[in-house]
Amino acid sequence: MYDEMIFRYSAVFCFWFLFPVKQAFTQSTAEDSSLRQAAYQHTVSIYDNQLGDQSLLYNGSRYEKYPYNFRLGTAYYPYDRFAVGSVTYDNIQFDSVPLLFDELQQVLVLNKDGYELQLISERISTFTIEGHVFLRLAADSIHAGIPVTRFYELIYPGPSQVLRATSKSIREEAFNADEIPRYMVTQEDYFIRQGNLYLQVKSVGRISELFTSHKNEIRQFVDSNNLNSDDKVNALIRVAGYYDKIAK
C-alpha cells in the first residue's frame, strides 16, 4: 500500500509540472485553486483507469522470497511459479490474475508487472489456481470443528463438502559446514462437512461413523466398493457424493 501511495502521488506531481500553468499566474486565487484540483483529479483518473476494476486489489505488502533453495519439495502450490487464477478480495471477485500460493506461510501472492505483492489474508474469502478452489475458514463458532484459521482446498463442493488442509514445515539436515540441505515436510488432513459441523476424517475405514443418519448404508458402500484400500481423496469424494445422493 505504501508503494502504491508513492506511485500515486509521484504521478500527481509529474502530471502537475506538465500541466499548462502559463495562464494560471494571471488568474485569481480561487481560479488557481480550481486548476490545481482539476489537475489532481485528472491524474488520479488516469491512474485508476490504468488499473481498471482491479485497483482495489493492489494493496498489501511486498512478498519476500525464500533466501535459500529446497533440496526436496516446494513451499508453493501447485508449483513455484505464478499461474492464472481468481480471487475474491473484500467481497469483490477478480478474474484472470497471476497468483502464487505459499502453502508454508499460508499467504497468497499477486504479480503486478514484476512486483510481487502479498495480499492480506483476512480480506480473502476464496481463490482459485489452476482450477483448484481454496476457502479461507476461520476457527470460530460459525465453522465448528475447524481447528485452525487458514486456507482449505475444496476437493468436493457438494453439501457434504470435503476439504483438504495441507501443512508444510522445513526440516534441516547439516551434512557439512558449507551447506544445510532443507527439505519440505508435508502433512495432509481431511474434513467433511455435516450440517454446521466440520468433522476430521481419521481414516476411510471409519468414515461411516461421521454419517450418523445413514451409517449402515455408508459402511456397506465403502465395503462393496473396496474403498478402504482405495486412494483416500477419491474415497472421500465418492462417499460424500453417495451420502448427498441418498440423504435427499
Image (cartoon, rainbow, N blue to C red):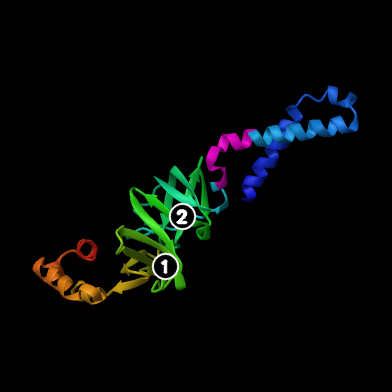
For the C terminus, which image quadrant? bottom left
Q: Which mark is residue 108?
A: 2
Q: Which residues are the magenta region?
A: 46-56
Residue beneath disc 1: 177
The amino acid type of the residue labelled 1 equals Ala
Q: Secondary structure at mark 1?
A: loop
Would you say 60 lies left or right of 109 here? Answer: right
For badge 2, the amino acid type reads Leu
Q: Nearer the viewer, residue 195 or 56?
A: 195
Disc number placed over residue 1 in the picture, else none: none
Q: Residue at x 45, y 50 (%)?
A: 87
Q: Nearer the viewer, residue 219 or 49?
A: 219
Query: Residue at image x 43%, y 55%?
Result: 126
User: In this view, which residue lies farthest toward the left?
Assistant: 224
Which residue is at 14% across, 69% downward?
222
Q: Please indicate, yes or no, whether residue 223 appears anywhere in the rendered image.
A: yes
